[in-house]
Image (spheres, helix red, strand yellow):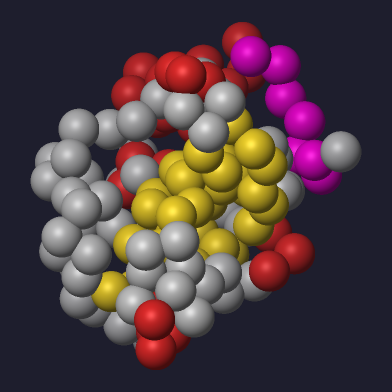
Amino acid sequence: MPNVEKTEEEWKKELTPEEYRVLRESGTEAPWKGAFVDNHETGMYSCKACGANLFSSDTKFDSKSGWPSFTDAAVAENVGTRSDDALGMHRTEVFCKNCGGHLGHLFDDGPVEAGGKRYCINSVSLAFEKEGEQKTDAS
Ligand SMILES: [Zn+2]
């Protein structure tokens, strides 16, 4: 069970419509439109919904897919995977274990030298904290 449990009404109040669509309804943002696709800053990516640390810039790579991509989770206990057979495709969903929010999908076409995994994550599901700076709340 996720640590953070809120009603859908509560999530709707806290998240923007696009964040809600992706995080709570397993939506996907348009490729190349996300805020972090070309972010090369050093720091930590956390869950936009609950703030749990998820991915580090250390494992971010330029996948040319149009979404922020990582070879591994930074905090393994916060990043869960489960099979997703929606849309007639067999894929592996990536979700935040802390709140159950949808993050993206996991593929096996990542850089071989880094383990071959590609965590393909929606920017809208993430908040970014640049190393050495306090987390800024955009809202
Ligand atoms: Zn979360």
In which quadrant of the rendered image does the C terminus lie? top left
Q: Is residue 92 above or below residue 75?
A: above
Which x, y percent locates residue 71? Answer: 44, 72
In which quadrant of the rendered image does the N terminus lie? top right
For residue 7: magenta?
yes
Q: Quadrant of residue 113?
A: bottom left
For residue 110: magenta?
no
Q: Residue at x 36, y 18 (%)?
A: 17
Work out which residue is located at the far right of the displayed protein and give it. 1
Q: Residue at x 45, y 61 (%)?
A: 108
Q: Is residue 101 above or below residue 118?
A: above
Q: Residue at x 64, y 38 (%)?
A: 83
Is there any visible trace of residue 48 in the rendered image? no
Q: Residue at x 23, y 64 (%)?
A: 63
Q: Is residue 36 left or right of residue 58?
A: left
- Comparing 87 with 138, the one in front is 87
Which x, y percent locates residue 125? Answer: 43, 43
- Comparing 38 with 5, the one in front is 38
Which x, y percent locates residue 80? Answer: 68, 52
Q: Is residue 29 left or right of residue 107?
A: left
